[in-house]
Image (tube, rainbow, N blue to C red):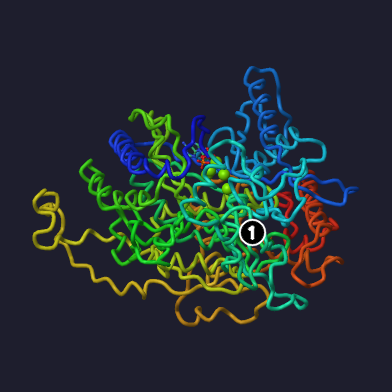
Amino acid sequence: MGLLQLGTALDWPEAQKHADQVRKWGIKQLLEIWNKAKTKERDALLWGDEVEYLVVTYDKDQPKSLLSLRQADILDALANDAALAAQGGCTEGQVDGASTKQDPLPVFHPEFGRFMLESTPGKPWGIELKELVNVEPNMKLRRVIAKDHMRSDEFPITLTTFPRLGFPGVFSDPHYPVSGPKLRSQFVPDEIANPHIRFPTLAANIRTRRGRKVQVNVPVFRDINTPWPWKDPTVNYDLDKYPEDADVRNGAAPDNYIHMDAMAFGMGSCCLQITFQAKNITEGRQMYDQLSPLGPILLALTAATPIYKGFLADTDVRWNQISNAVDDRTPEELGEVPLKNSRWRIPKSRYASNSTYISTDPRLRPEYFDPELVVDEEIKAELMQGGMDERLATHFAHLFIRDPIVIFSEDLQTLDLSQTNHFENLQSTNWQHMRFKPPPPDNSIGWRVEVRPMEVQITDFENAAFAVFIVLVTRAILSFDLNFYIPLARVTENMETAHRRDAVLNDKFYFRKNLFNARRRRRSPHPGEGSASGTSTPNPQSRPETPVILGSVEDEYRPMSINEIINGTHYPAHGSAAPPSHVTDGEGFPGLIPLVESYLDSMNVDVQTRCQLATYLDLIRKRASGELWTAARWIRSYVDQHPEYKHDSAVSETLTKDLVGAVLEIGEREAQGAGWKGLSVPGIDKLMGDFRGCGGC
Ligand code: ADP
Ligand code: MG
Ligand code: MG
Ligand code: MG
Ligand code: MG
Ligand code: MG
């Protein structure tokens, strides 16, 4: 999240009148950045992570664990201390040898939920592989610093969602009544959102634009005692304060679904994000495309979200819930009624999987593009007139089909081309699973790519492992010029697949079979194509073009299990004696971890670093093979074995408290660095194995 602007935020009917102006000005700002930064070269390969936390209260002598709404106080306290530290007035402690004396202090940011925090390292990480071992200590340090600025009964935890969010009485602060004017939710109060005017306005304007409340319905997990058909017992059909209260009477809460009705149920979830800086725009565009097909795989591997509003869900990840929680599409855009006032039907929410490929890579075939892509042709033409190539212009003209949701009236006076506020207004409310970030106007930073699908993990060991894994995969992509392209429509399907319970073990994902096909030279132009500019005149020095025979796109990929994708075809799935069928079919796949290992073999890595990296890769290898559980599987199992659980899908207050207690115990043990052996948390050995750093190397 960027800096929070002060000003007068417009309500939807007013904001809508200025949507075109904001888009036009945003495009002018984008062209300004583009022209300044398109030739930017030799930026360093930097990267950084973002970890999001819930702030909960816990006291083993109290009956409940609650959500704290003290984000603002905690952030103020953190900012004050950071300011003191900057003046040399304060030094933070050391955690696991992570010296904070020379490194800038971690940075904490607000998030949508008033019960959330986000942290980033004080400065991005560099290209050196040995720096990768500093990530985990830095994440641990952040947790210590965050905790130091909380009350003694408050704790930062990295569960993706608070299990009972939406039940009455889950907040530690004075009770706030639900059904406030902004969210109009029957389950959560307006006070749940960060009080900065941007957030309640975002939620209210999404609802108004949509014409009804957002609808977040998650299939309930059917256990042996779950009444069936299941009716969400928390839905109030009699409430009649706002027109939107009729939504549930009009079918918004179908049988067998947990029903939620506010942005907080989605944007109140915590994730782990990684941002890379590329050396130039070409490399940035390549990274954006090549990492995109990995998104659903990463989502399924990090699955950590099996409970909503006090009930076990039949899905394992947060993604679609966020997608629905910010879906501002009108009934016309949704295709429910014929188009009249809206400009087009839009197949996806503004929070959804990627819809564009943007690279200049000649291996990018037209068949890979999304056939359903909606673009604003006028905007595309304007970008191309401004010098942008068609492919990138298409990407931004797609993002700009949306309306700006929060507009500050102060911004509408003059267009400042040295700023990016209007561009960012659209860019930062298009929440796809990758984001392509242009340099800021002062060009101090390069072209960046953000990886956004992962669920946050319970421990920093796991969060560091996934962060490091993505970094290494990215290095392998660049080093071996790997090709992960599959049609975007398949990536979208994979994203759905990733939601299924235990998709990591039981489901197959479309994945490219051959990652190594060399770049093909550009095909020769069709008659008349491109000849006016002269750019396609064959270079007489080069060898004559041999026409490339491309096979069918459908033959380039096949469904694979996550175990195959991560570990390769020759690695057995946990507990299965039979070799994977594809080995005998001649359809072997090398696996991402073996590729990363080849990359590491080709680099000069010191023994200590290599050993630490091996523990991270081992965690991921075992999660993929089923030897270890995802957090989602562990939480389900924790609920299942709890004496209070009645096998009716309901997660009680006591159970929630005990689950939070278990998570805190795991965190305490992690801080001690002693490994997991002997910890009395049920299932800990299946979640974490027996990792304890690389003491054994
Ligand atoms: P947002 O919330 O918009 O995604 P944040 O500022 O919260 O942005 O996080 C950005 C991430 O990018 C942080 O991890 C930060 O360390 C990292 N970062 C900052 N500058 C660079 C850079 N030049 N190259 C790569 N990563 C960077
Ligand atoms: Mg951030
Ligand atoms: Mg953000
Ligand atoms: Mg965030
Ligand atoms: Mg978030
Ligand atoms: Mg981010």
Q: Residues within 10 Å of mark 1 (few under 14, many from 20)?
A: some
The spot of residue 693 in percent (x, y) is 71, 49
Is residue 304 depicted above or below 83 in this figure?
below
Quadrant for ligand 4 reads: top right
Q: Of the residues shown, which amino acid type is indicated by label 1?
A: Asp
Please state if 279 lies on the left or on the right of 272 as rendered: left
Q: Residue 238: which quarter of the image? A: bottom right
The spot of residue 349 in percent (x, y) is 46, 58
Residue drawn at (60%, 33%), measured in percent from left and top?
107
Residue drawn at (73%, 49%), measured in percent from left and top?
695
Work out whether residue 308 or residue 359 is closer to the camera in this orientation and state it: 308
Work out whether residue 673 or residue 10 is closer to the camera in this orientation and state it: 10
Work out whether residue 197 or residue 129 is closer to the camera in this orientation and state it: 197
The spot of residue 59 in percent (x, y) is 86, 46
Please state if 126 lies on the left or on the right of 646 as rendered: left
Q: Residue 305: which quarter of the image? A: bottom right
Does residue 484 show up?
A: no
Is residue 159 depicted above or below 635 in this figure?
above
Q: What element carries label 1?
A: helix
- The residue carrying mark 1 is 618
Residue drawn at (83%, 56%), measured in percent from left and top?
658
